[in-house]
Image: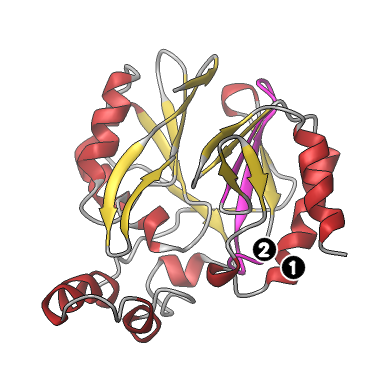
Amino acid sequence: MKIANGVEMLEIHVTSPRGPMVLNPTLIYDENSAILVDAGMPGQSQLIVDAMDKAGIAPSQLKAIIVTHQDLDHTGGVLEIIHAAGKPVPVYAHELDQPYIEGKLPLVKSNPERMAKLLSHLPEEELDKALEIFRNQPKIPVDQLLEDGQVLPDFGGIQVVFTPGHTPGHISLYLQESKTLIAADAMVSSEGHLREPVEQNTPDMETAIRSLSKFLELDIENVICYHGGLSHENIREQILHLTQESK
């Protein structure tokens, strides 16, 4: 779905151990190059490559992949997409999630023990297959660290907004030219209505809600949530409501 000139919200329909779901990576691009924000679960890269192709972008045009945080449904396809690009593609992320993305530390939420409890309803054979994904998380070298307030000069300016809580190093991105916020998992969207992050998957909910106040400093016309997709009506009022509701 085209959100603005040079901004495409990809819609990736996948089947996860928890059932069917839609993921929304974002493609930022011009006629020559592109940046992909988040990359799905392991084994889903072809779905993302196909969605990029529909937007007229080949993997070889990628100049970077930005990983908003360590969760496996955001990092899982990174190495596969770099392989599809046929060239080195630098990976950007925040310092606090770097050791998890690189596999030096176990993922905060997707460790096999926690996932075994969450997926205990599955038959044993399906459970073993699902847990294998989490036992063998990809080890992704992070080439560039991103800091709060940093503005990448690409595509009209990509501002980094540090939004911890969902993970220690979670970031969101504000596309200055199109006034589009890539919220990642800092919020979710339900039929265009913004919601706070899913509490079950957010270890530090208090910090996560506090992070939302940073968005009030931005002039936002569109919000892309990784889970739930686009929200574009009364954005400031919706975010203000979320921050006040928690008090």
Q: Residue at x 65, y 39 (%)?
A: 193
Quadrant in which the N terminus appears: top left
Disc 1 crowd rating (10 Å Cα; few below 14, some 14-19, many 20+) is: some
Camera-side residue: 46 or 243?
Answer: 243
Which residue lies at the image location 67% right of the left edge and 63% below the top edge? Answer: 164
> For the point 75% across and 34% down, which residue is it?
235
Q: Is residue 203 left or right of residue 49?
A: right
Say if mark 2 contacts mark 1, CB within 8 Å: yes
Q: Residue furthest left?
A: 125
- The magenta span reads 164-184
Check disc 1 and report the residue beneath it: 207
Amino acid type of the residue that numbered disc 2 sits on in the rendered structure: Pro
Q: The residue tagged with tag 2: helix, strand or loop?
A: loop
> Is residue 172 rendered magenta in the image?
yes
In this view, the residue in front, 87 or 199, is: 199
Q: Earlier in the sequence, mark 2 or mark 1?
A: 2
Q: Amino acid at mark 1?
A: Thr
Q: Position of residue 199 (x, y in %)?
A: 60, 68
